[in-house]
Image: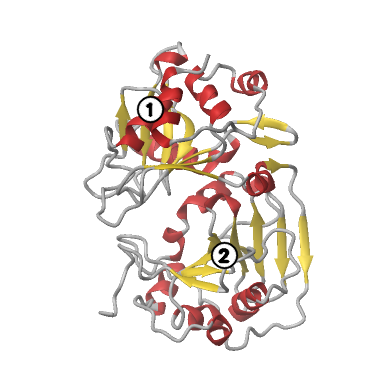
Amino acid sequence: MVHEAVRRLAEATGWTGRSYVDTDWNVVHAKLGFELPSDYRDLHAVFPPGSFCAAGVLNGVMVQPPYRVDGEPDLLHQFEVEAQETEDWRREHPEDVPEGMVPWARGDREGLFWVRRSPDPEQWTVAVSSAGIWGDDDAPVVEEFDCGAAEFLLGFVTGRLHSRVLGPVEPDGGAAGFRPIDEAEWLGFCEVSSPTLRKVSLPARDGGNLAEVLGWSGTPKWLPDWDVAERLLGLALPGDYKELLSTVPVGVYAGTVLLGPPTPKGHQNDLLAEHRAFMSELRTRADDLPYAVFPELPGLLPWAEFSHRMAGELFWLADEGDPDSWPVVVRGADGNWEEFDVGVAAFLAALVRDELPSELVAYKPGAPAYRTLQDLPGAPSNTGS
């Protein structure tokens, strides 16, 4: 018998299928040391991995079953970033964050947790957290709701429940419903094993006129102040990266790589603030990485991420030498790594030409070489365009 809230959620979203994922919850519970709520388990029996969307709210709620780590399901692996960010905030502001929160879903940047105020998981409540980083100024760091996971999603989708942390209702926001992730796509990044490092040499170190390759002839609405960016970083940045972002605005390359200038609210031109989430995660796992993490040099310094947030990130292996010689490093969702002996422009040029010899990043079939995101509602602008 399916949990009543899950049944009503299926009706509200029009979903009539079943999940393509079969999770061994006994293994999950044994690793955690406690059981998870029954509505959450039923949710994953009915719905495949995907996003629940509310009318007018730009950010949906991504719900995925546990990833498989070395062949076994592990709930916490996919939430390392959100859990670490929230724990960091709790240590500094214990009054803001309840102890013992357990993650179960995510927004665009926010984490969704259970608050374990009872030993009975059926009594756990839901909390949405910005970790003090991603929310609006007038939104709380943690917003708690007196309901379970399925009931929260039902309220979110139908509009009967609104989270200030997840974002305001916008006239140009999306439609309500459920958007499943393609099975082949999800299976491509849900299996995680011990990481490997592969070094790749490309024949061309020069990306040429990348804007021409992309077919871009417009003007960015946001121009970075590179003097400020480099002063905040304490390092000069590669010339091809600065030239590219002074010419081509924020956008998605080959349907895969999301690249834009550092524009987080209140931290404009701060590259590390733009990528604070996964830098925080990397530092907590520094002993398990094939490289050191900036500010240690040589160390990983982020410059872009995959368009699907959980698919991976892109870095330079930065050092005190010539920044134009920094290699590009890719971390995939499976935890594996690749190092390319080229800079940003040459890397992206090979990607959009579908000539990149990578096992972690590839041209998405049917996607354009480049798609600008600078015209989306709320996109930053400092040029008056």
Task: Give the quadrant of the C terminus.
Answer: bottom left
Label 1 neighbourhood size at 10 Å, few (<14), some (14-19), many (20+)?
Answer: many
Are dots 2 and 1 in contact, CB under 8 Å? no
Residue 41 placed where, x, y %?
54, 23
Label 2 Cα neighbours within 10 Å, binned few <14 / some 14-19 / many ≥20: many
Residue 362 appears left or right of 34: right
Q: Secondary structure at mark 2?
A: loop
- Judging depth in this view, the residue of 185 and 257 nearest the camera is 185
Residue 219's x, y, as percent? 39, 83
- Going by the numbered disc 2, the residue's amino acid type is Gly
Quadrant in the picture for residue 116: top left
Q: Is residue 370 above or below residue 266?
A: below
- Residue 234 in view, yes or no: no
**What residue sits right under mark 2 in the picture?**
255
Please tell me the numbered disc located at residue 259.
Answer: none
**Location of residue 48 in the rendering, given as x and y in whole percent from the top left corner:** 57, 36
Query: Looking at the image, is mark 2 or mark 1 earlier in the sequence?
Result: 1
95 sits left or right of 124 in the view: left
Q: Residue at x 63, y 31 (%)?
A: 74
Which residue matches tag 1? 126
Please provide percent x and percent y for residue 223: 37, 78
Which amino acid does the dot numbered 1 rest on? Val
Placement of 234 over or under 182, stated as above or below: below
Which of 94 and 188 lies nearest the eye of the viewer?
Answer: 188
Q: Tell me the mark number nearer the camera, choosing from 2 and 1.
A: 2
- Say if 370 sits above or below 196 in the image: below
Can residue 123 be seen here? The reply is: yes
Q: CA distance from mark 2 to mark 1?
A: 33 Å
Q: Is 67 positioned to the left or the right of 212 in the image?
A: right
State the residue lying farthest toward the left.
138
Eyeballing the image, is 44 above or below 30?
Answer: below
